[in-house]
Image (spheres, rainbow, N blue to C red):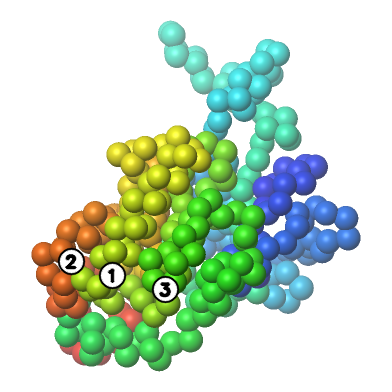
Amino acid sequence: MFHTIMAQPGDKRKREDEVENGGAGESATSAGAEHPLTGFKLRSVLRESARDKTIFLHGQVSDEDAVVILERAPFQEDTACRLLAGDPALRLQLKNDIYSVYQLSPPPQLNEVKTTIIRPATEKHIKKYVRQELHLIQESGEDYRSITLPFIQSQSFSIQWVYNILEKKAEEDRIVHENPDPALGFILLPDFKWNQKQVEDLYLIAICHQRGIKSLRDLSGDHLPLLRNILQEGQAAILARYGVPGHQLRIYLHYQPSYYHLHVHFVALGHEAPGITVERAHLLSDVIQNLELDAQYYGSRTLTYALRADEPLLHRFQDAGRC
């Protein structure tokens, strides 16, 4: 299971539940519901980031491995105002001339911690969050056909949760926009990393209805109508719902993607979202232009991306003498 809950006393907000398996559930604090962390035993700290105020933990719950991600919620204007109202208690830590540093302990209702739980977690999940050395791969079109594609076909990557969204079996209430056309259509919905409380870190995903397009490598000139439609309708839907114009959005595809069904990321331009680095993110506008110039551009183009030291695909490249 994949749960995202907000660690806040009395919070009855519906959580985004079972994202990887495509389910949707009620709040973990609902009456009669099993608490997802009962008896949690810490095994190790996988990674922590002081900059992002995030920590990744590996533990066990009822003899099942679990990965728990704790992330401080972003500040919002109304929360900050409430936090500073009424002369809150401040403990002085440092004072020098006009500069002073205090510790402020917020009340529980203003002290949210986004808590993401993956349970049961596989070894792959656990390794995903361990900080590891990265290797830069330069994958030619032939490398893709002889190394990467056979690797993808040999793996059991489940994307049933994606089909559950497309078939309205899960997360239907989260859909921001849908074009149901089987060739040109897509569903636009918030990414689970966005709490939907402020547009500064807006993050949505467009998942195409057309199946069989695994990644950037499968795109050709035949897909230009689909890509143009996602770009235009996605921008219009976000402007209508959130008031964010297209020139304030970073719209891109990942290669390698995190799952092999074509999807496009729509992110607020000022938000430093994971995966926006130059070796992974490909702007949708650039993809469209490249395919207009050469309908088979991504079948032959050398694509550069990073792989973690423990990833099996990296070992395939090493065994082939390509890394």
**Residue at point 34%, 58% (across, down):** 229
Examine the rendered structure and indicate whether residue 197 appears above or below residue 144. Answer: above
Say which residue label 3 marks: 210
Q: How crowded is mark 1: few (under 14 residues within 10 Å), some or many (20 or more)?
A: some
Circle 3: residue type? Gln
Q: Image quadrant of residue 66? A: bottom right
Instruction: Determine contact: label 1, label 2, CB under 8 Å.
Output: yes
Q: Give percent across and percent down for residue 250.
A: 33, 47
Circle 2: residue type? Leu
As drawn, the label of residue 291 is: 2
**Residue at point 57%, 67% (across, down):** 165
Q: Image quadrant of residue 270? A: top left
Relative to 261, 280 lies left or right: left
Q: Give percent across and percent down for residue 212.
A: 39, 80
Separation (CA) of disc 3 from disc 1: 10 Å
Q: Quadrant of the C terminus?
A: bottom left
Q: Which residue, as the protein is rendered here, is positioned at the far right?
A: 32
The earlier-in-sequence mark between 3 and 2 is 3
Separation (CA) of disc 1 from disc 2: 9 Å
Q: Which residue, as the protein is rendered here, is positioned at the far top?
A: 97
Q: Which is nearer the eye, 122 or 20?
A: 20
Circle 1: residue type? His
Separation (CA) of disc 3 from disc 2: 18 Å
Relative to 146, 78 lies left or right: right
Q: In which quarter of the image is the N terminus?
A: bottom right
**Residue at point 72%, 47% (across, down):** 13
The earlier-in-sequence mark between 3 and 1 is 3
**Residue at point 16%, 75% (across, down):** 296
The earlier-in-sequence mark between 1 and 2 is 1
For label 3, the SS is loop
Say which residue label 1 marks: 223
